[in-house]
Structure formats: C-alpha cells, structure tokens
Image (spheres, rainbow, N blue to C red):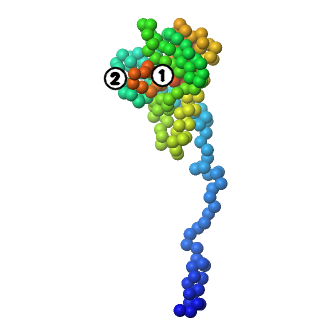
Amino acid sequence: MTRAALLLPLACLTGCVPWTVRPLENGTGASQRKFDAGRYADDIWAAKLLPAIDQAALDLRGLLSRGALKPGSHLAVRGAAVVLDVSIAPPSGKLVLDLLPPDGRADALLQTGPEMRGTSLRDATAVVPFSQFVNQIDFASAATELNRRAARVLPPPAELEKAKGRNLDFTGTFTVVEGEPPSIVPVRFRWAGDAQ
C-alpha cells in the first residue's frame, strides 16, 4: 500500500468533527449557584415552617404521659411550663422546664443557644424535604440556618438569666432520644401573662 493511500483516510478523519465542543459554564448557570442557607431559612420561616409546626404541634405533657416515643423521631410540640433552672452558658444554653401543672420535677429542656443542636426543626414537618437540595451539604446548611433563626425568638440572655420561677408558653420541635428528656428548639416563646 502506498503512502498516499494511507494518508487519504487520515485526512478524511481530521476533516470531520463528530461532536460539538462547548465551553463549560463559568459558574453563572443555575446548577453552579451557591446555596444561600440564610436566605432560604428567612424565605420559609414565616410563610411555610411556622404554620406547619403550629398545625403539627402536640401537647408535650400529653405526649410524655402516653410514653412509647420512637427514638429518632422528630416531633413538633407545644406546652406551658415553669422554669426550674437556668444554664445559658454558651455555646448551648438551656432552661429546665417543669410542665404545668407543676410537680417539681424536670420534664424537658428548652434550648437557648446561641448554638441550637439537632435537626428536628428541619425534619419535624414535610416543609424541608431532602429532594429540594442538590446535596447533603446544602441540606445540613439549611438545618443549621433554621436553628440560628430559631434563636432569634428568645429574649436576650440577661432576661433569660432571671427566668427561674417564671412561667412560659412555647412551641418547638425535638428529636426523641431514648432515656433523655426532650430538648426543644423553640419557634414560639412568651412569658405567661405577656401579650401575644
């Protein structure tokens, strides 16, 4: 076979481009946009999340009296309580609650932050499904920002420090942990007797 015969098919191949070459997006496309967890939390807080929690919230005293809570489940609850003790040292403070009518025993904890723990706020309703997110990192970021948003419903630390003996009403969420009292992330909070 002559050299010309060998070069002819090669020349034909180089003249054809069987695919289209396009540059990669430079980060401006929808798939490249960075997830803004703070904005997401603000967008759904009053419009979707609070109504869903209000609708799903069970009376905490009744729930605890029935017992047999499934470990790992995320629940929305409401209740009224007297504060037995206060520990608001950062990063994760708490109020120790005796649900009304009081019996002098601790029934639950109300997280006061500034670092709220757990994902119950994200997971207690169907408002924040994983299917809305492109990855696990964004899903986790949403939980963190919702917890930060929850910390804003509480009075300032100086007021919480003087909470012992005061009555309060709350709505919030918690994750059931076997052998531990509910550790509630609040979404609504008011001292009993205060205006709504």
Q: Which residue is mark 1?
A: 183
Tell me which amino acid carries mark 1.
Answer: Ser
Residue 14: % across, % down? 60, 78
Q: Which residue is mark 2?
A: 68
Q: Out of 4 and 40, give the one closest to the viewer.
A: 4
Which quadrant would the C terminus be assigned to in this image?
top right
Residue 23: % across, % down? 63, 61
Q: Is residue 129 above or below residue 149?
A: below
The residue at the point 53 percent across, 37 percent down is: 140
The residue at the point 59 percent across, 19 percent down is: 89
Q: Which mark is residue 46?
A: none
The residue at the point 45 percent across, 13 percent down is: 106
Q: CA distance from mark 2 to mark 1?
A: 17 Å
The residue at the point 48 percent across, 42 percent down is: 131
Q: Is residue 40 above or below residue 161?
A: below
Q: Are marks 2 and 1 in contact (CB under 8 Å)?
A: no
Residue 33: % across, % down? 61, 47
Query: Can residue 71 be seen?
Result: yes
All told, the count of numbered labels is 2
The secondary structure type at the circle numbered 1 is strand
Tell me which amino acid carries mark 2.
Answer: Ala
The secondary structure type at the circle numbered 2 is loop
Query: Can residue 153 be seen?
Result: no
Hey, which residue is sitting farthest bottom in the picture? 2
